[in-house]
Image (cartoon, rainbow, N blue to C red):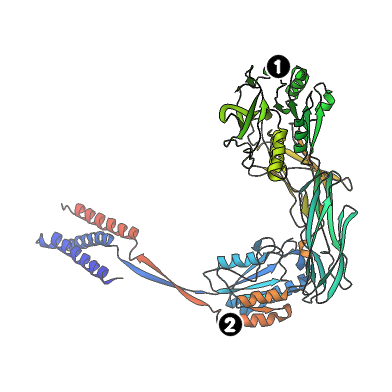
Amino acid sequence: MQTETVLLVILAAMVAILVALFQYFYRKKKRTRLTLFLAFFRFLGVFGILLLLINPQFAKSTYTIENPVLNILVDNSTSMQEHGTDVNTVLEALNNSENLQNRFAISRFAFGTDLKPLDSLSFKDKYTNIGEPIFSINEAYRRKQGALILISDGNQNVGRDYTYQSGPKKPVYTITVGDTTAYEDLGIGPINTNTYAFLNNKFPVETYVRYQGSGSIATRVQIKVGERTIFSETIELSESNNLKNINTLIDATTVGLKRISVSTSQLPSERNIANNSRETMVEVIDEKTNVGIVSEILHPDLGAFKKAIESNEQRNVTFLKPNALAGTLEEMDIFLLYDPNRSFNAIFQFIKNKKTNYLIITGVNTDFNFLNQVQEDFEVELGYPEQEVFGRPNAAFSNFDISDFDTDDFPPLTSDAGPITMKIPHDVLLDSEIRGVNINSPLLTVMEQESWKKGILAGADIWRWRAQTYRSTGDFTNFDSFMGRLVRYFTASAQRDRLNLEYSNTFEGSNRAIITATYFDQAYIFDPDATLNITITNTENGNSSSRTMAIRSGYYEADLSDLEPGSYEFTVNVEGEGISKNGSFAISDFNLEKQFVSSDHKKMALLANNTHGASFFPDQIDSLIEDLTSNNNYVPTQKSIENIVSLIDYRILLAIIIVAFSTEWFLRKYNGLI
């Protein structure tokens, strides 16, 4: 307690004595035994009040002994299954060491995919991440003295390199289990390819072959699509040249999910052949866009449109007459209506009924009276002479990118259309310019009504634009790319689906096979009360099963990780709504934990060296225990905790004050004193 506080307590006592003396001795001449009692209670009450105001405090120290921490991390991945006996022997030795138990506060953890307290070891985790648990333990115990014991084979397949730790570091004592002998081994790396490929196109396949060994070898690499070999090459590898990239292009000849497998031949002394092959899946889809150009006349524009549109192999142009059969029209995705007149009436009715996207191209043979009557989106003024019209890109157009479309050198188009009055919302792509003056009438504009897309180009002789592109640049890219984007805009559907699926078409055996879905009600608001069922069928043996998708935060999920490797088709349906969607995927027979043939004791030793620890093997467990218990860096520390507490509990002090004044008052009244 501070000197000032002691002086204040003494002063308070003196003041209380003076008050009591003044009350019962100075003012009264007659003193009895009762007077002494009353003076004492008055002193006690006043002194208590003053103590309550002063609140004297003193420092109270407590001392504790804290042992250094020892965190034991055990690899629980599938690659450790064969070494379970060694792991249990090590753990038993650590648990039975009294010196270790007395010296350290020991915590035990298991890791694989995640870090968790060690309860029991299953050796079923499909990944090994050594760096993350070490970092997490160091962060959690950064203020405590101690060390880590890592029991693992040293083979990590996900996460950052564990040999170099950032942030706070504790010494790591490694125990490497498993066979540390270096064997010759070949391995296939990850296969990089497209998720989807278009029919009759080529798609790339890229991977690499890795060699571990001291000699020189030759091996044959094969790439198969299904059972058909489409690539084969003999490569040579050595200790100094131990990596070879494999690149090829594969023809997508048929539609469907294609299994792509890459494999190498087995070496005579190779022990681990699980990593000699790897698989992935590519879905080949037919997304060819059918464009119907409807015209009654022959014109160079028709050929220009066909060449520009078909510069992308996924688009096909068909020339049609206005009286084409309905079956033929059904096959078209969009229509280009060139110089429409009254013979186009049936085409317009078909488009209106089917809400097929279309683009109107007007020229000097267009019947504008008919055009104004057959649709209600715009109106063209009549009676204008044939004239030359230049097109200028509208910088404000934002439906798709036209920033690289240059019309500065383009010749004019021919048109006898008057100004166009738009009656519905629209976006102008090209403005009309006549004799250097913008006439505020669109040359090319697009419109959209509830995902129904329409457009009008008020000018003919567009073949001149494609020819000028070639004259200026030596190819047709500028014009063809513009037409490609325009066609893509008209073929892209803006329709919102109430049921949407998200999944990968390939799940490697080590990965979780997850399919997620979102379902919206008729107002397109996520519906968490719906029941979504998924039916999965194995296409190889026909086995089928159904399950209900689990509701998550804003989506539905089906975990299919329990399925065996193979090819599957599935259907997701909304119970009671008649809404469903189909898909397909494949689960490959691949396990990251089987990609290593021996334990990596060198990396384990490097980790120990970088953290000022030491590296051991299971038969050296006694040396590890001796090293830890004799190391003066790990000794118990005494810690003191100083608490500032009140000299007297205020509740007790209040009780004393109340009792003192109450007793004084009662004695005075009982004896007839005022």
Q: State which quarter of the image contains the N terminus.
A: bottom left
190 vs 195: above or below: below
Judged left or right of residue 520, residue 673 is: left
Q: Is residue 483 visible?
A: no
Marks 2 and 1, how far apart at CA: 99 Å
Q: Which mark is residue 370?
A: 1
Q: Secondary structure at mark 2?
A: loop
Residue 651 placed where, x, y %? 34, 58
For label 2, count other residues whose C-alpha is less than 10 Å away and answer few (under 14), some (14-19) or many (20+).
few
The disc labelled 1 sits on which kind of residue? Phe
Q: Could you say which is closer to the camera, residue 658 or residue 481?
A: 481
Residue 501 drawn at (x, y percent)? 72, 41
The amino acid on which the numbered mark 2 sits, given as a three-letter code, is: Asn
Q: Which residue is mark 2?
A: 631
Foreground mark, 2 or 1, reads 1
Q: Which sits in the foreground, 643 or 368? A: 368
Q: Quadrant of residue 292?
A: top right
Q: Residues within 10 Å of mark 1 (few under 14, many from 20)?
A: some
Identify the residue shown where x is 84% and y is 75%.
Answer: 216
- Asked where in the image residue 18 lies, by quadrant, the reply is bottom left
Quadrant in the rendering for residue 79: bottom right
As drawn, 54 above or below 288: below
Look at the image and tell me whether residue 268 can be seen.
yes
Q: Which mark is residue 559?
A: none
- Along the line of sight, the residue nearer the viewer: 98 or 459: 459
Numbered circles on residues, count: 2
